[in-house]
Image (cartoon, rainbow, N blue to C red):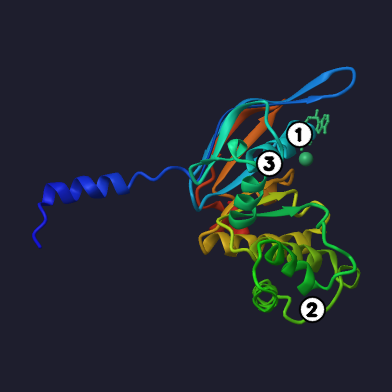
Amino acid sequence: MHVEPTVHAAERKVVQVPEPMLKAERVRKVYRTGSSDVVALEGLDLEVPAGQFLAVMGPSGSGKTTLLNCVSGLDEIDEGRVLVDGASIHELSDAARTRHRAESMGFIFQAFNLIPVFTATENVELPLLLAKVPEAEAKARARETLERVGLGHRLDNRPPELSGGEQQRVAVARALAVRPHLIWADEPTGNLDSEMAAAVMDLLCELHDEGLTLILVTHDPTVAARADRLITVRDGELVGDEALGTHRDVPEEANVA
Ligand code: ADP
Ligand code: MG
């Protein structure tokens, strides 16, 4: 069949302008405590394209965790809206939002948040079972994902038997098991020594190279330097937004020059 070249070009142009994976518009978050209100986010706008590795920095108390919790839909917002894959997540019912999150997002926290009496495999199986993946498949996928993060030899160990770096890799596997498009990480290297932190970051960068979108909060500039883009938050507002280019591909020795 013959297709007019002009029509073809026009169609292609439409296809080439994808919606950002994540779009936050004028997001406001107020914590209401007994005596005073804390405005933790004030009119935050943010767009994150699919496949980006975005680092979020800012002083303690500046609103980084609030940003992650509100923009991911873990927490409610007071004003504005957040679109993830085109869905306005805070307008979904609780059940629909939980399902959307379970199917498309993974979370990694500073304190690992693993269940201590469960084995590594059982910890990684959990989100799959919650997402109604049949048991045998959940187990197979948990093992496969643990192998992917280099823990094939620790499948049946419980968190107290693992090093901090290994525990965080279990947490990364747990976040990955549902095959999310988007991973949120809040200070994922905050409880690790520098060697373990580097190993966890190597893993996250590899996953990003494979196409995963990654939004990572950190106060460590060496961690942030590996991102594609760095935003800075202060007093609940975005005060900086810079492209980092390909820094993380440059060997450290080369950076010194
Ligand atoms: P960061 O992660 O950058 O350290 P947070 O997002 O945790 O900052 O906190 C931003 C501000 O909101 C801080 O002033 C903090 O004290 C306040 N805050 C955070 N969580 C709560 C809460 N649950 N109740 C009241 N205030 C809070
Ligand atoms: Mg925080």
Element carrying mark 2: loop
Q: Nearer the viewer, residue 18 or 129?
A: 129
Task: Judge whether 31 appears above or below 254 on screen.
Answer: above
Residue 225 appears in the figure: no
Using the numbered discs, state the Cα–Cα distance from disc 2 to disc 3 in whole angstroms: 30 Å
x and y percentages locating residue 233 in the rendered image:
67, 32
Pointer 1 residue: 59
Q: Residue at x 77, y 62 (%)?
A: 168
Using the numbered discs, state the Cα–Cα distance from disc 1 to disc 3 in whole angstroms: 15 Å
| Left or right placement of residue 99 versus residue 37 in this view | left
Pointer 2 residue: 154
Pointer 3 residue: 68
| Left or right placement of residue 62 versus residue 231 in this view | right
Q: Nearer the viewer, residue 253 or 1?
A: 1
Name the mark nearer the viewer: 1 or 3: 3
Q: Check disc 3 and give the amino acid type.
A: Leu
Residue 181 appears in the figure: yes
Q: Nearer the viewer, residue 100 or 114?
A: 100
Q: Residues within 10 Å of mark 1 (few under 14, many from 20)?
A: few
Quarter of the N terminus within the rendering: bottom left
Discs 2, 3 touching: Cβ within 8 Å: no
Q: Seen from this angle, which residue lies furthest top?
A: 35
Q: Quadrant of ligand 2?
A: top right
